[in-house]
Image (cartoon, rainbow, N blue to C red):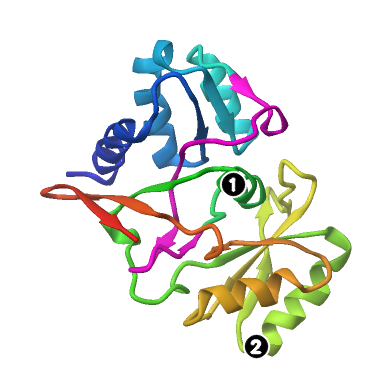
Amino acid sequence: MTQDELKALVGQAALNYVVPGEIVGVGTGSTVNKFIEALATMKDQIKGAVSSSEASTLRLKALGIPVFDSNEVERLSVYIDGADEIDHQGHMVKGGGAALTREKIVAAQSAQFVCIADESKLVQVLGAFPLPVEVIPMATTRIVRQFQAMGANAVVRQVNGQPLVTDNGQHIVDVNGLKIADPLAFESEVNNWPGVVTVGVFAHQKASVCLLGTASGVRTLTF
């Protein structure tokens, strides 16, 4: 199966975790786009969605799924999103789509985080994928230096020769060369650096379930 077909497979499988009559938390990215397409087939059975990005909001609305502001919703039963990496404890690296801050916000108000990914995303230790960090622009250079002092290589993500601007008006620093052996401690440390909005390690808001697309079907991991 192609990677696109694997994404469609787990997107469809995630419907089993959507609670009829409730509002579902929806993430961002190419795998989530497949889930949104699947979700449209049962849109009359749910109240709507809370979205983690402008891109997902547009896609949901285009398919006739109402989108609520997160402040309007006290609690979500489930948040469904992809990952750039996930380890065997459910810790993830996220932010390849530059939506990591809003993804953490929606994950934090959800009772369950269901990660949907293809099997290439499952790793022993986080760090093979560049770690995204959303930062306030005036702190960018200093934060790049802090990662360099750790022995990593950090660069500001660019679009058309200019720094990418997130939905929150911030920049993304992508960090290569890390081995994140203790995701909880690492997340706590970097989140405390002045100027960091969100680090893309999801350890405090880790997945409780991962639906992993494989050549032999969907493999379910629970944490």
> Up-down: is 84 above or below 177?
above
- Residue depth check, mark 1 versus mark 2: number of the one nearer the observer: 1
Q: Is residue 33 left or right of residue 72?
A: left
- On screen, residue 131 versus residue 17, left or right, reads right
The front one of 2 and 32 is 32
- Residue under the image location 24 percent in, 37 percent down: 9
Give amino acid for label 1. Answer: Glu
Q: Which residues are magenta?
A: 67-93
Label 1 sits on residue: 103
Which of the two residues, 44 or 140, is positioned nearer the viewer here? Answer: 44
Q: Is residue 205 magenta?
A: no
Q: Which type of secondary structure does the marked residue at label 2 adopt?
A: loop
Left or right of residue 158: residue 1? left
Task: Give the x, y percent position of residue 202.
Answer: 54, 61
Tally of marks: 2
Vertical relation: 149 (above or below) 131: below
